[in-house]
Image: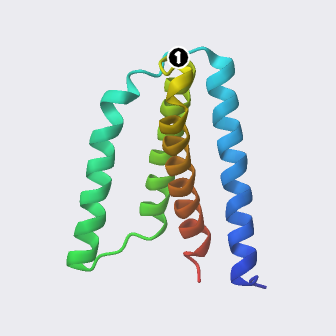
């Protein structure tokens, strides 16, 4: 039985919360240097946006593969932005830090929601 659309949103938020908590815990406990992501992620995001635009213009749709790639991309952004907040940003940078994590979480949520809703 398929659930109501509202249930799907709740499940997507739950999955997003678990992923965010796990990634934040990983960055906090690992003490690894994730600065290399700062060079990789902008190019990946540009490619993702161009691919998204091309899919709209040319009418192709990769469904779950596109959503999975987006979820991985925005998970990597959570890792990088969390690392930046912990290691490079100061106390005065709290507004930009909140905006960055907010955007990462919202985009991850949208990709998870798309993954869950692809079979509908």
Q: Position of residue 60 (x, y in %)?
A: 29, 76
Q: Position of residue 14 (x, y in %)?
A: 74, 57
Judge left or right: residue 13 versus residue 62: right
Q: Quadrant of the N terminus?
A: bottom right
Q: Residue at (27%, 41%) from the top-left corner?
A: 43
Q: Position of residue 2 (x, y in %)?
A: 74, 84
Q: Residue at (35%, 74%) from the top-left corner?
A: 61
- Residue 61 in sight in this render: yes
Q: Is residue 61 above or below residue 19?
A: below
Residue furthest to the front: 92
Q: Residue at (56%, 22%) from the top-left corner?
A: 91
| Number of residue marks | 1
- Residue 76 in sight in this render: no
**Residue at disc 1, secondary structure:** helix
Q: Nearer the viewer, residue 77 or 68?
A: 77
Q: Position of residue 67 (x, y in %)?
A: 47, 62
Judge left or right: residue 18 versus residue 53: right
Could you say which quadrant of the image residue 10 lies in?
A: bottom right
Report the residue marked by disc 1.
Answer: 87
Q: Is residue 35 above or below residue 18?
A: above
- Packing grade of label 1 (10 A; few <14, some 14-19, many >=20) is few
Q: Residue at (26%, 51%) from the top-left corner?
A: 47
Q: Is residue 55 above or below residue 2?
A: above
- Colour scheme of this structure image? rainbow
Could you say which quadrant of the image residue 85 lies in?
A: top right
Q: Nearer the viewer, residue 81 or 2?
A: 81
Q: Nearer the viewer, residue 41 or 68?
A: 41
Q: Quadrant of the C terminus?
A: bottom right
Q: Is residue 75 above or below residue 79?
A: below
């Amino acid at each position: 039985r398929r659930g109501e659309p509202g249930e799907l949103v709740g499940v997507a938020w739950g999955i997003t919360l678990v992923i965010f908590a796990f990634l934040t815990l990983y960055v906090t406990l690992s003490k690894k240097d994730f600065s290399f992501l700062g060079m990789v992620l902008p190019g990946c995001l540009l490619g993702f946006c161009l691919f998204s635009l091309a899919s709209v213009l040319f009418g192709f749709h990769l469904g779950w593969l596109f959503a999975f790639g987006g979820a991985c991309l925005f998970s990597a952004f959570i890792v990088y932005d969390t690392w930046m907040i912990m290691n490079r940003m100061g106390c005065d940078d709290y507004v930009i830090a909140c905006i960055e994590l907010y955007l990462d979480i919202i985009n991850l949520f949208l990709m998870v929601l798309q993954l869950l809703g692809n079979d509908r």
